[in-house]
Amino acid sequence: MTTKPPEDQQHWQQPAWDAPTADAESDPPKATIDFGEPLSGAVLVPATPAPPPSVIESGLNVIGAVAWPVAIALALFGVGGWWLNIVVVLVLSSLTSAIAGEMKKHRKRQ
């Protein structure tokens, strides 16, 4: 159900657009600055890329990634209890991520 507004109310109207009549000498057009091509990558900061992760670092990352799904699957199959699996996976994932993080920092510093 909609109601119509009363006809005696004032309505706002968009004012007419008047193009400014500026004198060409008093208001010159603004100059555009050409910055050229955008720079990216090694052009901005020349640096050597970091070496790839070692086998041990990659292995630790994989262990940390699969720890939670394995713990959940083991708990569903009745191996260990839920709380035991959660505690073990928390300790395991925190250790592997900390060691892999330190290895990554050391690798990036080289």
Image (cartoon, rainbow, N blue to C red):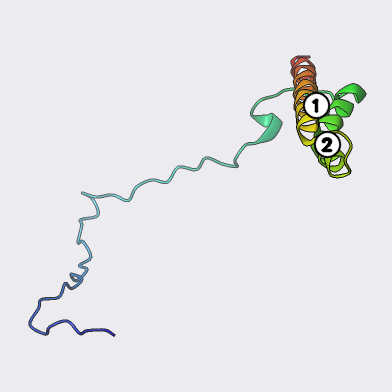
User: What residue appears at the point 78 percent right and 14 percent down from the top-left corner?
Assistant: 110
The relative height of residue 97 versus residue 9 in the rendered view (above or below) is above
User: What residue appears at the point 77 percent right and 23 percent down from the top-left corner?
Assistant: 91
Apparent side of residue 46 relative to residue 71 in the rendered image (left or right):
left
User: What residue appears at the point 75 percent right and 32 percent down from the top-left corner?
Assistant: 83
Q: Marks 2 and 1: CB-CB under 8 Å?
A: yes
Q: Which residue is mark 1?
A: 88
Residue 58, position as x, y percentages in the image: 87, 28
Q: Residue furthest left?
A: 8
Q: Which residue is mark 2?
A: 71
- Sequence-wise first label, 2 or 1: 2
The relative height of residue 14 versus residue 101 in the rendered view (above or below) is below
Q: Amino acid at mark 2?
A: Ala
Please tell me whether mark 1 sits on a helix, a strand or a loop: helix
Apparent side of residue 8 relative to residue 68 in the rendered image (left or right):
left
Q: In terms of depth relative to the viewer, which is nearer, 72 or 9?
A: 72
Residue 104, position as x, y percentages in the image: 77, 21
Please tell me whether mark 2 sits on a helix, a strand or a loop: helix
The relative height of residue 38 versus residue 27 in the rendered view (above or below) is above
The quadrant where residue 9 appears: bottom left
